[in-house]
Image: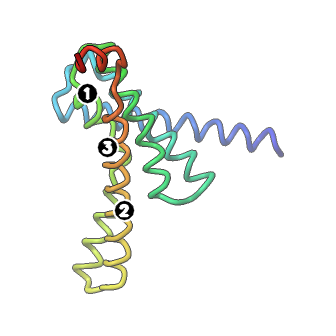
């Protein structure tokens, strides 16, 4: 039943959206983000997670999905920072938490403790690739000037 499948996919989409939003707001609370910015933080986290989730449905590669997801997430942080006149990090730090490879870190440590060298190396390498992909995506977006007119003024 195509209609039933679509309804289930919509419900799952809304569930993912709500959980990413709520999780990000909780991290914002933990990091003492002012309450007036909770909604913006939640939106940033939800954007990143939903892009990641859709990418994993299309091409199940956590590294590629993380790289693609962190780009609109970082763009959203820059937009919120300008619109809300707040530091980028206020939105970026809580917003990126849904994408941080916490499970990968856990499984790497678990494999290390249990002496499973092969699993430790495999999980550790994948976790490191995801972390590097996140850092690269953030660096690329942050290196793009926000206002081209400011560049012309700085050159003079």
| Residue situated furthest right in the rendering | 1
Horizontal relation, residue 126 to residue 113: left or right: right
Q: CA distance from mark 2 to mark 1?
A: 24 Å
Q: CA distance from mark 3 to mark 1?
A: 15 Å
Say above or below: 110 vs 105.
Answer: below
Q: Are marks 3 and 1 in contact (CB under 8 Å)?
A: no
Foreground residue among 79 and 35: 79
Residue 88 image offset from top left, x and y in percent: 25, 27
Q: CA distance from mark 2 to mark 3?
A: 16 Å
Dot 2, how many residues are within 10 Å of its Cα: few (below 14), some (14-19), or many (20+)? some
Q: Residue at x 37, y 53 (%)?
A: 133
Q: Earlier in the sequence, mark 3 or mark 1?
A: 1
Q: Quadrant of the C terminus?
A: top left
Q: Earlier in the sequence, mark 2 or mark 3?
A: 3
The residue singled out by tag 1 in the image is 88
Dot 3, how many residues are within 10 Å of its Cα: few (below 14), some (14-19), or many (20+)? some
Residue 40 in view (yes/no): no
Look at the numbered disc 2 and give the secondary structure of its residue.
helix
Say above or below: 85 vs 116.
Answer: above
Horizontal relation, residue 128 to residue 30: left or right: right
Dot 1, how many residues are within 10 Å of its Cα: few (below 14), some (14-19), or many (20+)? some
The residue singled out by tag 3 in the image is 97
Look at the numbered disc 3 and give the secondary structure of its residue.
helix
Residue 50 image offset from top left, x and y in percent: 51, 39
Number of numbered markers: 3
In the rendering, which numbered label is found on residue 129? 2
Foreground residue among 101 and 131: 131
Can you tell which of label 3 and label 1 is closer to the viewer? 1
Can you tell which of label 2 and label 3 is closer to the viewer? 2
Q: Residue at x 31, y 49 (%)?
A: 135
């Amino acid at each position: 039943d195509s209609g039933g499948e679509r309804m289930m996919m919509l419900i799952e989409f809304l569930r993912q959206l709500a959980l990413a939003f709520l999780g990000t707001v909780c991290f914002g609370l933990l990091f003492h983000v002012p309450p007036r910015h909770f909604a913006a933080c939640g939106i940033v986290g939800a954007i990143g997670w939903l892009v990641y989730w859709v990418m994993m449905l299309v091409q199940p590669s956590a590294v590629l999905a993380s790289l693609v997801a962190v780009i609109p997430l970082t763009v959203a942080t820059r937009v919120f920072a300008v619109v809300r006149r707040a530091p980028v990090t206020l939105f970026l730090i809580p917003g990126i938490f849904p994408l941080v490879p916490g499970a990968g870190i856990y499984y790497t440590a678990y494999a290390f403790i249990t002496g499973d060298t092969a699993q430790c190396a495999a999980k550790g390498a994948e976790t490191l690739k995801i972390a590097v992909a996140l850092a690269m995506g953030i660096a690329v977006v942050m290196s793009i000037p926000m206002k081209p007119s400011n560049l012309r003024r700085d050159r003079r």
